[in-house]
Amino acid sequence: SQVSKKKPLIILKSGITSSGAKAASSHTGALAGREAAFDSAFKQSGVIRAHTIGELFNYAIAFANQPLPRGPNVAIVTNSGGPGILAADACDKSDLQLIPLHKEYVDELRTFLPPVASFYNPIDILGDSGADRYKKALNTVLKDERINGVMVLLTPTAVVDVEATAMAVVNVSKLIDRPILTSFMGKKSVEAGNKTLMKYGVPNYSYPEEMVSSMNAMYRYHLWINRPEKHYPMFNGLKEKAVQIFDTVKKENRDRLYELEVHNVLHAYGFNQPKSLFARTSEEAVAAAKGIGYPVVMKIISPQIIHKSDIGGVKVNLNSKKDVENAFFDITTHVRNIMPTAHIYGVMIQEMIPKGKEVIMGITKDLQFGHMIMFGLGGIYVEVLKDVSFRIVPLGQEDAYEMIRETKTFPLLRGVRGEAEADIEAIEKSLLILSQLALDFPQIIEADINPLMVRQRGEGAVAIDARFTIGGE
């Protein structure tokens, strides 16, 4: 990150596969892979990632020749509607924003553009445009100080002088400190113009999408070099409460923590959890449910069973003594039929937590980068939807903030169709504490909290279920 703050660092990484994820037992481990590790490392160190050789050179040409945009607002000037719309679509998928020009500059465009031109970004100056019209349009657009960069499109027509138009763009570019990128579309028909543009440091791209992608990379780099120094919260005094648990697991030569041990580790690190009582028999289960208060949840407890829901090891919304007795019989019988060699310790009776937003967070260990923290939509479908984000430990406050907002399901946390907003600050704090846990205990190789039930804003979150796997020192 020290290098990338001073000079753009563009990297194309090959040979990234997810083969190693196949052997993972946790949701987090199955979702992680070399791709996630490198992607996280690049994001956290300010690396500009290229996904193809073409992108690598596209980005390099832009960074080498043009100033950075100081904001996301861009304008598109085109002589053809179709390519202009393609460029606008690409902007919508990026971090760039197409904003309408201020009224006075729209009025100025009307003084020299044909009435059928489009004056609202993208600005279509029509197919009969010559170099002079391009120059006037660019000068007018750049009078609007809110525009941070301009992208110029040209489609060859019978009347356009490609080389003269290229020179007009170059002359405008020389007078401003904002980036201009171009996409003169075609091959031989725009070759002379392309050479002129490149000679004077105005990057030209074969397609609109390449132009927009390069402008977006420059804007993201502007954000990186101007972001404040990261703040890394420290949670002191938590490790001491959990050391004995991990020492015991190591002494007993186990690779997984028992349910009660997981509960105690999470408790030591301040995670809210449902009221829980362990029961070996049906009678103990009924007593535990009565002590906690109906309704309750019942979960099978066995060191051989990792994903309880997959084998019918969870019963929810038990409202009476009969419900608990029947559930105990159903769960233990079903599990013994499916996994006859599994050692069943009993069941865990938990209070039924009111519905909230289910998310998942976890720890996985990459061979090269070390521990990573994962966040995503929770529940049993997490490996199908794969709507997750990763960051390498340690997490800064900004990392936790960005991880949550990277997921496609983030709008659900903000509340849709009149739903209340979830406690996003509680999620951020949980991610930071999990990062601290990974730092404190490097022997953790995989961990899941799934689901973390997030209540309404200001009401916190509850860790419903979790698992930890350790290995090494």
Image: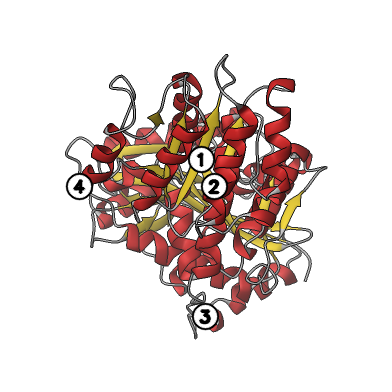
Which amino acid is tagged 3?
Lys
Q: Residue furthest top?
A: 158
The mark closer to the camera, 1 or 3, is: 1
Badge 4 is on which residue? 420
Q: Position of residue 466 (x, y in %)?
A: 51, 54
Displayed quadrant of residue 341: top right
Badge 1 is on which residue? 151
Residue at the spot x=72%, y=69% of the render?
250
> Badge 4: few (under 14), some or many (20 or more) residues near its Cα, within 10 Å?
some
Q: Which badge, 2 or 3, comes first in the chain's sequence? A: 2
Left or right: residue 342 versus residue 404 is right
In the foreground, 108 or 304: 108
Which amino acid is tagged 1?
Met
Left or right: residue 433 versus residue 20 is left
The mark closer to the camera, 1 or 4, is: 1
Residues marked 1 and 4 touching at CB (< 8 Å): no
Left or right: residue 423 versus residue 49 is left
Badge 3 is on which residue? 241
> Badge 1: few (under 14), some or many (20 or more) residues near its Cα, within 10 Å?
many
In the foreground, 193 or 339: 193
In the foreground, 143 or 1: 143
Residues marked 1 and 2 touching at CB (< 8 Å): yes
Q: Position of residue 364 (x, y in %)?
A: 65, 56
Mark 3, secondary structure of its residue: helix
Residues marked 2 and 4 touching at CB (< 8 Å): no
Badge 2 is on which residue? 180
Quarter of the picture holding the C terminus: bottom right
Which amino acid is tagged 4?
Ala
Residue at the spot x=73%, y=28% of the render?
191
Displayed quadrant of residue 295: top left
Whether residue 405 appears in this view of the structure is: yes
